Amino acid sequence: MARRQRLLLAALIAVGLGFIASAGLIGNSGTPDLSVTDNPAVEALIPNRGDEVLQQQSVGIDLSSQYQLVQLTISADARCLRPVDVTAHARHVEGLQWWIYTPAEGRPIRELAAESNCAEATFEKIAVPGVRETIRWSFTVN
């Protein structure tokens, strides 16, 4: 019985840590982003517009269940000049429609650039392929 209790406790701790990590990824800064709240496709940007983050911060988008990501790019400036396509390296969380790219060694972007960065996501409604929308946001790396 003690082994079963330890396994149950470990599982509960893992689930709790998962919820904490998820809340940190999609946490809201308290200021509504009108281009997100008015867009039925976009549920959250990761990180939020204007956030200050670390160089290893994950970058991505949380889409409504009716939409899918077409392309995710990250640029080392606030105007999205010279974008790097990270779509193929973004992790897709099935069912939640999250596409998240985490900088790492051996990936297109090893770490986010110091100062301003820009991310751009192009997505389409699953039922209407080919009709695409794009959202762009910038954030700062300290």
Image (cartoon, rainbow, N blue to C red):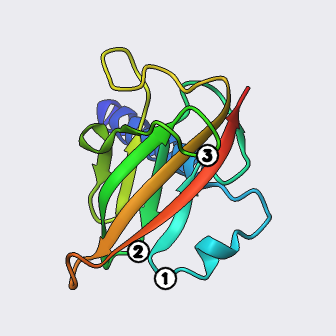
Total marks drawn?
A: 3
**Residue labelled with disc 3:** 79
Of all residues shown, which one is farthest toward the top? 105
Task: Look at the numbered discs 1 and 2 and tell me whether their residues touch, using CB distance below 8 Å.
Answer: yes
Instruction: Give the mark, 1 or 2, whose residue is nearer the N terminus.
Output: 1
Judged from the image, the secondary structure of the residue bearing numbered disc 2 is: loop
Question: What kind of residue is marked 3?
Answer: Arg
**Residue labelled with disc 1:** 40
Question: What kind of residue is marked 2?
Answer: Ser
Q: Nearer the viewer, mark 2 or mark 3?
A: 3
- Residue shown at 43% from the left, 33% from the top: 102
Q: Position of residue 86 (x, y in %)?
A: 34, 39
**Residue labelled with disc 2:** 64
CA separation in Å, label 1 and label 3: 24 Å
- Residue shown at 44% from the left, 76% from the top: 41
Instruction: Give the mark, 2 or 3, whose residue is nearer the N terminus.
Output: 2
Judged from the image, the secondary structure of the residue bearing numbered disc 1 is: loop
